[in-house]
Image (cartoon, coloured by chain):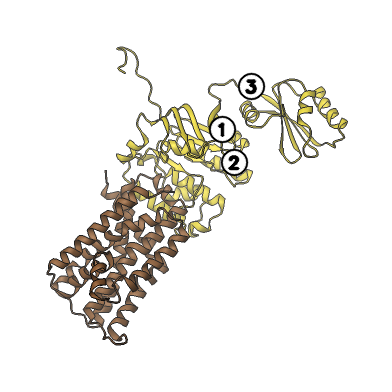
Chain colours: A yellow, B brown
Amino acid sequence: MPAEPGEPSEPVFPISCVDLSLIYPGGGGISGINLDFGPATTAIVGNNGAGKSTLLETIAGLRTPTGGQITLFGQNPGTWRSTGAHKVGVALQSGRPYPSATPQALLNYLHELYTSSPNRSGAPTVDFLVEAFALTTRTSIKNLSGGELQRLKCAAALIAGAPIVILDEPTAGLDPQGRRDLYEVLTILVPAESTVLVSTHILEDLESINSRVIALKDGAVAYDSSVGPRTSAFCLTFTSRPNLDLGGLYNALPEGVGISEKINGQYSITSQLHIDAAFIATAMNFCAQIGAEVLDVQVRKLGGVIAEVEDLLLDRGEQ
Amino acid sequence: MISMRRLFIQTKWEFRLNARNFEQALLLIIIPVLILFVLTNTTIIGGQSNPISLGFATVLTVSTFAAGFTSLAIATAFERRSDTLVFLGTTSLTRLEVVLAKSAGSFLLALFAGTFTLVAALLLGWIPATGALLIPISIALGVFSVSGFAYLLAGTVRAEAVLAIANAVFLFVLMLGGVLFTFGTGTTHVLEFFPPLALKHVMEASVATSGTADASIISAVLVLIGWGVIGHVLASRFFKWR
């Protein structure tokens, strides 16, 4: 369709998804994704199976959509590939590439592959990446720990200096300190003008990323912090016996709370309203009436985005 | 679009990874050299030992088949299992470049192995004729004739099964493909339509003659090209990258 004369042309986003779908033959996948990503960092959150990897791999051009369209700087991912332009640096969640090689050898080879790539000027050197990600250079990739492998994949994603960087669950298998460290390194290494997508199923990671947040649920966008309202929320956590009657607790409390049993016997109640002494007393009374012992009662004020996403992704204790 | 620079870097990387692998050395150098020694110094019951040139041609056929089929299939299958192939999909390499580099890496491996057997053959008394200059071309033709089937196997079956099948096929071809043992005229005529014996004929022509090609050699070359095309078409149709 020709643009009206004088009308400003539409901005070309680094990543643009229009009604993007990829439905697997056996069901599942993503559907109806409409998202544009500008040069900034976006966190993609969602439970396992929510479609995070499918979305990221489709954007990276590794999977062919079954519907809709994905463009990178206005072009098909396949078109970029056929012209030899390297637009996307990717760290995949699965796989252990070249298990018999050493991290150093793999990075040297990738560095050589991208030597004359147009983005080369701003890209980091192998030595710099090895040091920044604290990579062991002599051990074979097959003997790397989970955390080392994640760091190597991140280094491989950054080595080309591509304008788009996709990191699929880079913190999987890391302890909280390791996760914070990795994000710290990434914040330093990723150039400010890059378009970065990073997925995680650990909501606490959002405290380290501090960016736009998109939550996927059942293959669709359930929340986008750039669209939805940001409200702060409160969270009451406590430990008790497993399988409490969450429906009964929900009815006892003021309206609009989310209740979930995170793991066996660990409960979390989120609320948009202030959790005051009366609120806590109501919850504790309920437990007392059914004879459930309560430990580790804690009230926290949550960052707005995390609370909203948590509220969305966790199952509510309502009928 | 194929970038020669990327293709060169990828081929170098593939070759380096393969050449370090000890099983490859066994399959491509130690077994062929042993076969060469046995063929030229022993007699099989009721027969006689082979002249060195025929033994050398046989062994080149064996190492070319090992590099172009067995080790290529196994390496590719394990790369598929470890998602190395998907990883390559995230680099700037195109799929065609990935495949071409793999085939070129196998060719270099066969050439590398051929150099070892060539030295062994010279030590055992082989006198090269001008046809020897055609050996690299014959190796390339041999790799092409079977590499498509290596991809077909590696891209459709899980890695452990590929390991078993590719080694079994290697033994089968050695024993029954007309490479190590000759059969009656009728069987031989059938085997001539398959890569192992066709490749052996082409190798014999390059090792033992001054490079003259008669009609039977031309038909052997056509057989190799034909199987190469069939294998690669099937592989491109059925290969699964993960």
Q: Chain of mark 1?
A: A
Circle 1 or circle 2, nearest the eye: 1
Q: Is B115 on the left or on the right of A154, as rendered?
A: left
Q: Position of residue B65 (x, y in %)?
A: 31, 66
Q: Position of residue A90 (x, y in %)?
A: 44, 42
How far, Cα to Cα, is label 3 from label 2? 25 Å
Relative to B236, residue B69 above or below:
below
- The answer to whether residue B85 of the structure is visible from this angle is yes
Q: Residues within 10 Å of mark 1 (few under 14, many from 20)?
A: some
Query: The residue tagged with tag 2: helix, strand or loop?
Result: helix
Whether callout 3 and callout 2 share a subunit is answered yes
Residue at the extreme front: B186
What's the residue type where badge 1 is placed?
Asp
Q: Which mark is residue A180?
A: 2
Whether callout 1 and callout 3 share a subunit is answered yes
Q: Is B68 on the left or on the right of B85, as rendered?
A: left
Query: The residue tagged with tag 1: helix, strand or loop?
Result: loop
Q: Position of residue B8 (x, y in %)?
A: 29, 53
**Label 1: which residue?**
A218
What's the residue type where badge 2 is placed?
Arg
Q: Residues within 10 Å of mark 3 (few under 14, many from 20)?
A: few
Earlier residue among tags 1 and 3:
1
> Residue drawn 50% across and 33% down?
A30
> Residue drawn 26% across and 54% down?
B229
Q: Nearer the viewer, residue B216 or A113?
A: B216
Q: Quadrant of residue A318?
A: top right
**Label 3: which residue?**
A231
Image quadrant holding the C terminus of chain A, namely top right
